[in-house]
Image (tube, helix red, strand yellow):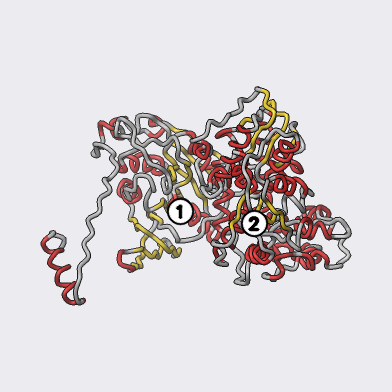
Amino acid sequence: MKMFVCIKRVPDTSEADVKIDQTAKNVDSSRFSFGINDADNYAVEEAVLIKEAKGGEITYLCLGPKDADIVIRMALAKGGERAARVEDPRINYRDPLQVAKVLAALIKKEKFDLVMTGCMSSDDSNMSVGVALAEELGVPHAAMVKKVEILDGALKVQRELEGGLSEVVEISLPAVLTIQTGINVPRYAPIRGIREAQKKELKVLKLEDLELSENEVNEAGSQVELLKFYIPEVVSNAEIIEGAPEEKAEVMALKLVKGGLL
Amino acid sequence: MNAEIQSFMEKHDLLGCIQCGRCTGGCPVTVRTNLNVRRFVYDSIDESMLDELAKLSDIWDCTTCNTCAVRCPKGLKPLEVLIGLRGLLVESGIIQPTVRDALESVFQEGNPWKKPRATRLDWAAELEAKIAEPGEKVENLLFVCCTIAYDPKLQGIAQNLVKILHKADVDYGLIGEAETCCSSEVYNLGEAGLFEMMVEDNTELLNSFEAKRIVTISPHCYTTFKSQYPLVKAEIIHYTQLLAELLENNRLELTNELKSKIVFHDPCYLGKKNNIFAEPRYILNQIPGVEVLEFERKKERSLCCEGGGGKMWVETESRKERLAETRVRDARAIGADVLAVACPFCVLTMDDALKAKGLEEEMKVADITEILAKVAV
């Protein structure tokens, strides 16, 4: 099984005091800690588990600055043969379709069976790169995957749907999966393993290496325009509906209809 | 493979064990868990058993309180066998997510609490604390500790200490954002590789200051620097030693009285590991109005609070009364209204125990810095 796993280094904003800078187009990240995107970490583990069970090889792909090397090395320490990081100021990292284009350019160069990435990045939360990547590669995809079973030339995967439902689908290879958190328990990369992983190949590439033209992936060529970041205003507008259950339900239903939600 | 296992047996001098069982007999956690450290010493001799032994959850019950080592008539360190077994698991990568996250956080941010390095000095924001500059002479370089720096419940320890140092006009300096985990708990969790790396980096950092002494606030940092950082040039002391020295030399005036019955709980890493028993008691005895009480189990026999040995990240499965709960019960029984400690882990475990026992109204847990700041600042 020849696998590619796309990973991203993201800030941990779970407890951080998030501030927007003066341009309103960036978040001040000077006081954040950084690490591998949570869902991507599960994709790494899933690839390593597949490799351990069925054999194969793993290549990690990442877009970002040199600081991202540490999360790549940690992934390589868990299992995997090589990695590539694309760092080019001309790339518009904000547009998931353009990010997918860059990743696809890396993958297309080789034969592959399976591409995995996290279902969502915890910073931009677009949930788009994985599925756009499948489109770029011209292969099927399954999103929000929480179980993978290897068949002959295909996969049987369980997808998470809304409302507590799951969907089981069979998908032919090659394919792209976006992995949901909780699918496995990501292992620890011991420091000795990380040191060993320094010996593994980590290529740093630019657009020219990918045979991509600048206007395919820069801000001018983007279909997405970032207008501004803002902190949502904290407002409280709760209304407690009183009465018997059936009365409450009726009032609630009317409110939802009037509000255009039903 | 044989050479590696041989080294495990040799490293821990397992054949030196005479199976007297004093280690297990003295082990404080045996009252609430099934840990039998003697069995691990004995069974680890069989090289084929090591991987299986490492999978037993008992190895995570050890709090590294050092009682087993203190009691061993052969001078062995049974706790190190358990740490060694933890190390086998860590090397395999298959460890509890809480342990994994703590270790990754030390590697990436220099602290085990998943906190950004950039916020390490936030606790000092309201103080005019002095930051030492590398290459500049400083009498006392203050090493704050990750848990104190980041936990809002504990930041007062460092704040009070800085206020006391200002009051006594002590030449001191903080390391600032560059301060990095001493890695005592990294070692105890079995990540020997990361520990070695941190020792190397921290030694370089600490030696970059022209410090006469490094004053540690946590006994865990103190023990680690003192016993596992052979190349650090400055003398390592614990803050209770500095405060006792200030009082002894009349450099710190105690201006207020404190009517209180205080019992001091000897932290394992201060007492059992380093024999520092006198200084905390001396400080408390200097405070006008304070009556210092003693536990029946004190000094070398002090009961572990279960906060060390990586236990901040590994919960013991036992539902029996926690040792810290026993401790606060005992403190109340002898009439104490303050349970004094000198270790951040003890503050956390004892304070939780106080709440669990519903004794918050009658008694308080306080670090010595908090008590002293009340009468000195």
Estimate how packed mark 1 is, as few (under 14), some (14 to 19) or many (20 or more) residues with alpha carbons within 10 Å. many
Q: Nearer the viewer, residue B140 or B265?
A: B265
From the viewer's perspective, is residue A10 above or below residue A172?
A: above
Residue at 72% of width from left, 34% of height from top? B250
Question: Which element type, helix, strand or loop, lies under badge 2?
Answer: strand
Q: Which residue is mark 1?
A: A43
| Cα distance in 3D space between marks 1 and 2 | 48 Å
From the viewer's perspective, is residue B106 above or below residue B80?
A: above
State the mark number for residue A178.
Answer: none
- Quadrant for residue B374, please give it: top right
- Quadrant for residue A252, please give it: bottom left
Estimate how packed mark 2 is, as few (under 14), some (14 to 19) or many (20 or more) residues with alpha carbons within 10 Å. many
Residue reaching furthest to the top? B136
Q: Identify the amino acid type marked 2.
A: Leu
Q: Is residue A191 left or right of residue A223?
A: right
Q: Is residue A196 visible?
A: no
Q: Nearer the viewer, residue B115 or A166?
A: B115
Q: Identify the amino acid type marked 1.
A: Ala
Q: Position of residue A192 (x, y in %)?
A: 65, 45
Q: Position of residue A73 (x, y in %)?
A: 54, 42
Quarter holding the C terminus of chain A? bottom left
From the viewer's perspective, is residue B341 above or below residue A106?
A: below
Q: Which residue is mark 2?
A: B339
Asked if labels 2 and 1 touch by Cβ distance under 8 angstroms, the answer is no
Residue at 58% of width from left, 29% of height from top? B131
Residue at 69% of width from left, 58% of height from top? B63
Q: Is residue B177 left or right of residue B287?
A: left
Q: Is residue B87 visible?
A: yes
Q: Position of residue A182 (x, y in %)?
A: 45, 60
Q: Is residue A198 left or right of residue A10?
A: right
Q: Chain of mark 1?
A: A
